[in-house]
Image (cartoon, helix red, strand yellow):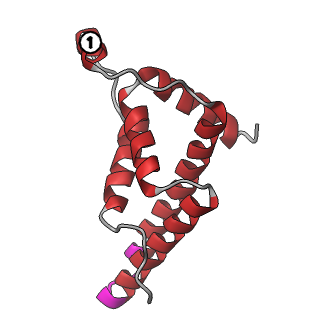
Amino acid sequence: MTKSAFPRRLLPALVALLAVSVFSPPESLEAQDQEAETAIAAPAIDEAQLETFVRVHLAMNEVRDQLHEDLAAWHDNTRRQEVREDADQRIEAILEEHGVTAREFEEFTQLVSIDQTWRDAFEETMDRVESGG
């Protein structure tokens, strides 16, 4: 197997950030006010960019789900390593296909996880893309 250019250490972080951004519980109003006071102004939402990141997110979810399924099927460490490397390569291809770097995707994921306006826009765009719109 060839070594993937996708930084392996980012895969767990990306998956965790995606999970946090989608499944995070609502904060208290006090915490939201405090966050708003200390937050750096988020960039304006670019609909085309948002849709690109949503498509990357959805494709990465498929890779993650397949990775978990494949890892559960194999107990041999060599085969499990090959499965992980394949997932890394697929993620790298997804990012390249959409013209997004791993760092850009990480920054986007962080933005969605901390900014309610971006989170709402992300969820609305994801619903639209998933429904074929």
Q: Quadrant of the N terminus?
A: bottom left
**Residue 74 versus residue 31 in the image, above or below:** below
Question: Would residue 93 appear left or right of 106 to someone viewing this image?
Answer: right
User: In percent of the image, x 55 and y 31: which residue is there?
Assistant: 123
User: In percent of the image, x 41 and y 45: which residue is there?
Assistant: 18
Residue wearing tag 1: 37
- Tell whether position 72 is magenta: yes
Residue 3, image x, y percentages: 40, 82
Q: Nearer the viewer, residue 59 or 40?
A: 40
SS state under label 1: helix
Magenta residues? Answer: 71-78
- Tell whether position 104 is magenta: no
Residue 115, image x, y percentages: 40, 25
Residue 112, image x, y percentages: 43, 33
Total number of numbered discs in the rendering: 1
Q: Quadrant of the C terminus?
A: top right
Q: Quadrant of residue 78?
A: bottom left
User: In percent of the image, x 46 and y 61: which residue is there?
Assistant: 64
Question: Would residue 34 appear left or right of 42 to someone viewing this image?
Answer: left
Q: Quadrant of residue 35?
A: top left
Q: Quadrant of residue 23?
A: top left
Q: Amino acid at mark 1?
A: Glu
Q: Nearer the viewer, residue 98 or 13?
A: 98
**Residue 120 versus residue 32 in the image, above or below:** below
Residue 36, image x, y percentages: 31, 14
User: In percent of the image, x 66 and y 37: which residue is there?
Assistant: 48
- Which class describes the residues within 10 Å of circle 1: few (<14), some (14-19), or many (20+)? few
What kind of secondary structure does the magenta stretch mostly adopt? helix
